[in-house]
Image (tube, grey):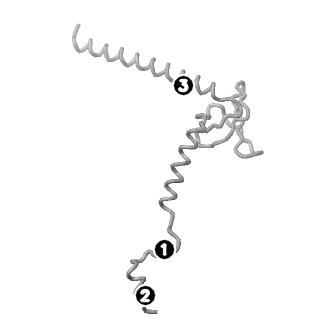
């Protein structure tokens, strides 16, 4: 056999191996996600809608999400992207608060050089 043919067959075998491996990983991740998708869980959809899962109808592939108290949305079950963990929400919220505190404007502080302010107050 030609060495090039052997290399090509080896590469083909590796591609097939990785395809099956990735498919198996995706199935495991989907099974874990489905276990977490229970009514009352905080979820996020593929298009960025956050809410609380009210019910899932697997027969019709419909999920009902409560986005605000008394406001529900019906979506396709496959649009449910992930379950939002409390730790993730707190960590994301803490980062945003720190960034805002550092960028907040200072009240009653002049943006002009202090020496210029003293000259102006002395002139009056």
Please say if 103 is above or below 65: below
Query: Residue visible at 43% across and 90% down?
Result: 122
Q: Earlier in the sequence, mark 2 or mark 3?
A: 3
Query: Which of the 4 image quadrants contains residue 2?
Result: top left
The x and y percentages for residue 79 are 61, 35
**Marks 3 and 1: in contact by CB < 8 Å?**
no
Return the residue found at the far top. 1
Query: Residue visible at 54% across and 53% down?
Result: 97
Marks 2 and 3 sit apart, C-alpha to C-alpha, by 68 Å
Q: Considering depth in this image, is 24 or 89 the residue closer to the camera?
A: 89
Return the residue found at the far bottom. 124
**Marks 3 and 2: in contact by CB < 8 Å?**
no
Quadrant where the N terminus lies? Answer: top left
Q: Secondary structure at mark 2?
A: helix
**Residue receiving disc 1:** 109
Classify mark 1: residues with Cα within 10 Å, few (<14), some (14-19) or many (20+).
Answer: few
The x and y percentages for residue 115 are 38, 81
Marks 1 and 3 sit apart, C-alpha to C-alpha, by 54 Å
Q: Secondary structure at mark 3?
A: helix
The x and y percentages for residue 5 are 26, 13
**Residue receiving disc 2:** 120
Query: Which of the 4 image quadrants contains residue 60?
Result: top right
Classify mark 3: residues with Cα within 10 Å, few (<14), some (14-19) or many (20+).
Answer: few
Eye-nearest disc, 1 or 3: 1
Marks 1 and 2 sit apart, C-alpha to C-alpha, by 15 Å
122 relative to 6 in the view: left or right = right
Query: Which of the 4 image quadrants contains residue 62?
Result: top right
**Residue receiving disc 3:** 29
């Amino acid at each position: 056999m030609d060495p090039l043919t052997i290399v090509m067959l080896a590469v083909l075998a590796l591609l097939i191996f990785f395809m099956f491996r990735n498919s198996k990983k995706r199935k495991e991740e989907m099974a874990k996600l489905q276990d977490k998708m229970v009514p009352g869980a905080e979820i996020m959809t593929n298009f960025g809608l956050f809410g609380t899962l009210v019910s899932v109808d697997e027969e019709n592939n419909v999920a009902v999400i409560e986005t605000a108290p008394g406001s529900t949305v019906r979506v396709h079950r496959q649009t449910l992207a992930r379950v939002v963990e409390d730790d993730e929400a707190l960590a994301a919220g803490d980062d945003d608060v720190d960034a805002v505190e550092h960028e907040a404007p200072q009240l009653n502080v002049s943006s002009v050089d202090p020496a210029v302010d003293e000259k102006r107050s002395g002139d009056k």
